[in-house]
């Protein structure tokens, strides 16, 4: 018998604290009960064992989603803290299960003969997870691994709390706002002391470092930005790395990077170092050429300058784009009023993937904040999920842009629900923000489309972690296409964004792609190196790696590792952004650049890549879509353009 699953009802404003607790507890109790049943009375059929395990995993994932989402987005601090507690309980149970020898024995006894491809893969992946958590080690080792996992959760929460809680600001004289857009200036009134506060939150720092003419004010703000969570997180990071080092060593891996890479496309730690060096080499000529242009432009203002750093580069890159590439970002943003962009994104992605986004009024679906917009998702007339767009900054909210799960979709059991959490302007968007919105939406579409599976293991963005960015990076291409943008980008006079402006924007965006790649490889090297080579001075090591991989010099007095959130989330695998981009460029080569809405290619991509979730290895999904294995060719050609 099948029932039609419904969306998860969320509580009224005053009931959140209880709801988060109850949702977390109810799912954890269910997970424990199912595991108990599995151990005491395991079904005789292997498939039934896997199904029971799937139900337990589903309950655990439901609790995990509530914990991790609401710890980051709920406006009420008490609810955020309660959600953190749920996340800790989930992690603890997950660790306990991974080290449960009785449970492992039940699953290891399942005969894979007669299982279909999906069930076999569930079994194989499950047993691999168990081995990776150390279930087959001795008692003392297992006890220590459990301690390390618990400690890792606490450290991770502390790391992100330190970043979230440390919004810094500078106070500047009104004339130091010269160069800033009028609407931004209007939104930043002069205080009683005659000064204006500019914060390190994205809606302030991004335009400020791009447009503010006052070099010292820019430098002061960027320095504050790169010092967020310092010194608190320096110690936390050392502890995180130590926990991971010990964890990997206990399981017999040479480094955390080897342990982590084992379940990714890249396979092993040393391949990360090779990849970083390969991309560094591919991008060097382009990086040096464009950096020379920046420096030359800086010298018009400061003839004595011999180098340009990260506090000046965004400003001069913008000037070069405006003066030499004829793109004025302030003109560009007039075409991107927030509401029109949001609707345009929905229309574009709906048409591309054959999806329908149906707005759900607030009276019918409560959320955690009045600015959250909710839509039901339909595909071929069937409701397949729900999305929530939480797109503006507020106090205590997650500071970056990301997709979070609220519910992972499982056929006939529960509908996929995903949440976009961003920090965009409420008025006009920068084109960068439009690109970010398309990017994050790529994760959301992946989450929903891959939410129609029996196995929660494969539901949503359940693919290898170095592939997850590829669908999002590819969707960014639609935010750069004149015909696509013409469907929604209009200024206050109702004029559509001109195609030649979009073409110029693309050329301008391509400016700096080489040095951006080098900067990305610096971040990737940081994430890899910190997890492989022990050091007592993270900032000193950062300086060395920056000198080797970035083309920009270190900014004195900064400690960017302390607010580089991905050091925790991605651990040694920050290379994945670039790795995914290589594959995104390759997949995009299958589309006709003159007809990005071609339903045949988009449909094949939807069905062969996105809808598959984790059912097959990413390399196989890509090969199925492209009709050949992926290569570096499209990426290298783009870099050389
Ligand atoms: Zn992403």
Image (cartoon, rainbow, N blue to C red):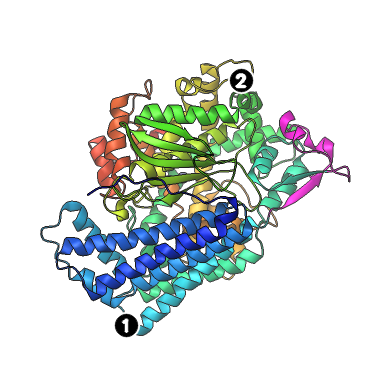
Mark 1 residue element: loop
Task: Please provide percent x and percent y for residue 298.
Answer: 69, 35
Q: Magenta segment, which residues?
A: 167-195
Is residue 275 something that shows in the picture? yes
* In the image, residue 599 above or below residue 558: above
Look at mark 2 in the image and give the residue it sits on.
491
| Mark 2 neighbour class, 10 Å CA radius: few under 14, some 14 to 19, many 20 or more | some
* In the image, residue 405 above or below residue 470: below
The residue that appears at 51% across and 36% down in the rendered structure is 361
The residue that appears at 37% across and 24% down in the rendered structure is 597
Task: Give the mark count.
Answer: 2
Q: Is residue 490 left or right of residue 388?
A: right
Inspect the magenta stretch and tell me whether residue 517 lies in it: no
Mark 2 residue element: loop
Q: Is residue 597 left or right of residue 629?
A: right
Q: Which mark is residue 138?
A: 1
* In the image, residue 76 above or below residue 43: above
The residue that appears at 37% across and 42% down in the rendered structure is 448
Inspect the magenta stretch and tell me whether residue 189 lies in it: yes
Task: Please provide percent x and percent y for residue 90.
Answer: 44, 66
Is residue 535 something that shows in the picture? no
Task: Please provide percent x and percent y for residue 266.
Answer: 34, 54
């Amino acid at each position: 018998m099948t029932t039609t699953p419904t969306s998860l009802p969320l509580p009224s404003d005053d009931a959140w604290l209880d709801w988060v607790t109850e949702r977390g507890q109810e799912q954890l109790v269910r997970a424990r009960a199912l595991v108990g049943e599995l151990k005491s009375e395991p079904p005789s059929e292997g498939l039934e064992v896997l199904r029971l395990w799937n139900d337990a995993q589903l309950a655990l994932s439901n609790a995990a989603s509530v914990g991790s989402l609401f710890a980051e987005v709920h406006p009420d601090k008490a609810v955020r803290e309660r959600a953190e507690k749920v996340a800790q309980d989930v992690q603890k149970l997950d660790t306990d299960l991974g080290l449960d020898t009785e449970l492992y024995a039940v699953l290891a006894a399942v005969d894979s003969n007669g299982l279909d491809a999906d069930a076999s893969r569930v079994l194989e992946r499950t047993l691999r997870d168990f081995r990776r958590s150390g279930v087959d080690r001795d008692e003392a080792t297992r006890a220590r691994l459990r301690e390390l996992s618990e400690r890792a959760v606490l450290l991770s929460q502390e790391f992100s709390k330190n970043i979230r809680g440390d919004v810094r600001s500078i106070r500047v004289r009104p004339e130091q706002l010269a160069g800033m857009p009028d609407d931004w200036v209007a939104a930043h009134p002069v205080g009683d002391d005659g000064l204006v506060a500019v914060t390190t939150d994205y809606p302030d720092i991004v335009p400020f470092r791009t447009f503010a003419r006052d070099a010292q004010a820019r430098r002061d703000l960027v320095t504050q930005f790169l010092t967020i969570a310092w010194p608190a997180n320096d110690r936390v990071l050392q502890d995180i790395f130590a926990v991971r080092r010990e964890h990997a060593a206990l399981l017999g891996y040479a480094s955390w990077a080897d342990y982590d890479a084992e379940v990714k496309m890249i396979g092993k730690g040393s391949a990360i170092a090779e990849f970083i060096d390969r991309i560094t080499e591919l991008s060097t000529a382009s990086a040096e050429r464009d950096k020379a242009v920046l420096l030359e432009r800086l010298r018009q203002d400061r003839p004595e300058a011999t180098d340009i750093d990260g506090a000046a580069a965004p400003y001069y890159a913008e000037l070069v784009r405006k003066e030499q590439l004829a793109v004025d970002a302030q003109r560009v943003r007039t075409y991107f009023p927030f509401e029109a962009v949001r609707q345009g994104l929905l229309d574009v992605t709906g048409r591309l993937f054959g999806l329908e986004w149906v707005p759900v009024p607030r009276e019918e679906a409560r959320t955690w904040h009045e600015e959250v917009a909710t839509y039901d998702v339909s595909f071929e007339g069937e409701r397949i999920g729900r999305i929530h767009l939480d797109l503006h900054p507020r106090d205590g909210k997650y500071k970056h842009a990301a997709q979070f799960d609220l519910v992972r979709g499982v056929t006939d059991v529960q509908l996929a629900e995903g949440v976009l959490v961003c920090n965009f302007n409420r008025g006009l968007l920068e084109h960068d923000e439009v690109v970010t919105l398309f990017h994050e939406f790529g994760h959301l579409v992946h989450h929903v489309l891959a939410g129609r599976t029996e196995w929660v293991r494969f539901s949503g963005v359940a693919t290898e972690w170095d592939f997850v960015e590829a669908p999002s990076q590819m969707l960014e291409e639609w935010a750069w296409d004149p015909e696509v943008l013409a469907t929604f980008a209009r200024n206050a006079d109702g004029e559509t964004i001109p195609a030649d402006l979009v073409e110029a924007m693309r050329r301008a965006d391509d400016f700096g792609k080489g040095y951006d790649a080098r900067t990305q490889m610096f971040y990737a090297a940081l994430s890899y190196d910190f997890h492989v080579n022990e050091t007592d001075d993270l900032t000193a090591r950062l300086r060395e790696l920056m000198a080797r991989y970035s083309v920009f010099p270190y900014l004195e007095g900064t400690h960017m590792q302390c607010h580089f959130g991905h050091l925790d989330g991605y651990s040694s695998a920050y290379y994945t952004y670039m790795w995914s981009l290589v594959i995104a460029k390759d997949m995009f080569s299958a589309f006709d650049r003159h007809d990005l809405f071609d339903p045949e290619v988009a449909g094949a991509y939807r069905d062969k890549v996105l809808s598959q979730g984790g059912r097959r290895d990413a390399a196989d999904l890509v090969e199925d879509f492209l009709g050949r294995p992926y290569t570096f060719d499209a990426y290298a050609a783009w870099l050389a353009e």
